Amino acid sequence: MSRLAFIGRRLGFSILAAYAVMTVSFFVVAVMPDPNVGLAAWTAKGDPDEAANAVVEAKNLNDPLLDRYLQWVVDLTTFDWGRSIGGFGRPGEPVIELLQSVIPVTLAYLVPALLISTTLALALGSYVALNPESRVATSISSVGYLGLGVPSFFVAELLLFAANEQFDWLTVAFPRRIDLVDPVSLWPYLIPATVLATGLAAGQLRYVRAESSELLGRDFVKLVESKGAGDLRVIRHVLANAALPLLSLFFADMVSTMVVQVFVIEFVFGLQGIGTLTLQAVSDRNMPVIIGTTMAIAYAGIGANFLQDVAYAWFDPRADFE
């Protein structure tokens, strides 16, 4: 099987996974009672039954299940994800427009954090593996364990205090709209990016150190060293051979970060990202937005898994024959 065919097959699996997520989400929503029906009856100024029936009629909840499912799939495929019923954004605003406004805010600190953490982990983990007995390596390992043990919200609070008291950074508010034409306006997002990168780098550093240490005693490393190669060339060969397991671990960290850490970071810093949107939607019982954010996060995970498969095909020629 060619590399292109392998990637095409993985892309097909990813699309099937996306529709599987759509199906599971539909049946979860279909089986569970809609909270807005009871809310409409509770807050009705007139007849509660009439208010509840109006919500049922508006959402076509009396239609046959198969018809509702097919309409659900068509709507999600065409990015017609419904409209917000209030709370975050304007009532009646399309969910897809809400997501388009908050996802760039999340990416403004998530992408730099991933780049910073990966760079630090590869550099520091390689150094520790090459110099396991040095004091610097011991210090790096100790700081790494400390980074794993300290909660991200505590690090965030410390940085907020330092930024406010020492540098007066927080006089510049986080912009709600991301303007890539003016990158200087994005510098406040380096603070949450640093918090996120701290925890990520601490975990990834251990992976790099463990994989590199395991490979340093192999015959191919001894051959490279016998040719007079320096540490930089040696570690380049080591990381090339450790690329596949490291990719798996790094992608797993990235997905778990998207699912958990964004909620903590955005709550502490007051960022108007996808985590804040999800929490507000849950608080408001805003079902269309809850479904939209859930689908967006699920699709991000599927996309990350597809990119991991593409990276496998790039780094490992054996993937062509799977």
Image (cartoon, grey):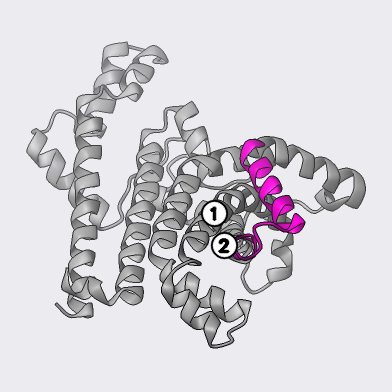
Which residue is at a point 43% across and 67% down the rendered structure image? Answer: 243
Is label 1 in a helix, a strand or a loop? helix
Which residue is at a point 38% across and 18% down the rendered structure image? Answer: 39
**Residue 78 in the image: x percent, y percent?**
26, 58
Q: Is residue 86 above or below residue 176?
A: above
Question: In the rendering, which numbered label is found on residue 118?
Answer: 2
Is label 2 in a helix, a strand or a loop? helix
**Residue 4 in the image: x percent, y percent?**
22, 79
Q: Is residue 89 visible?
A: no
Q: Say if mark 2 contacts mark 1, CB within 8 Å.
A: yes
**Residue 276 in the image: x percent, y percent?**
55, 40
Which residue is at a point 8% across and 33% down the rendered structure image? Answer: 64
Viewer-closest of 114 and 290: 114
Q: Which residues are magenta?
A: 124-150
Q: Which residue is under mark 1?
A: 204
Mark 1 crowdedness (10 Å alpha carbons): few <14, some 14-19, many ≥20 = many
Which residue is at a point 24% across and 73% down the rendered structure image? Answer: 318
On the rendered structure, is 72 left or right of 132? Answer: left
Q: Main secondary structure of the magenta part?
A: helix
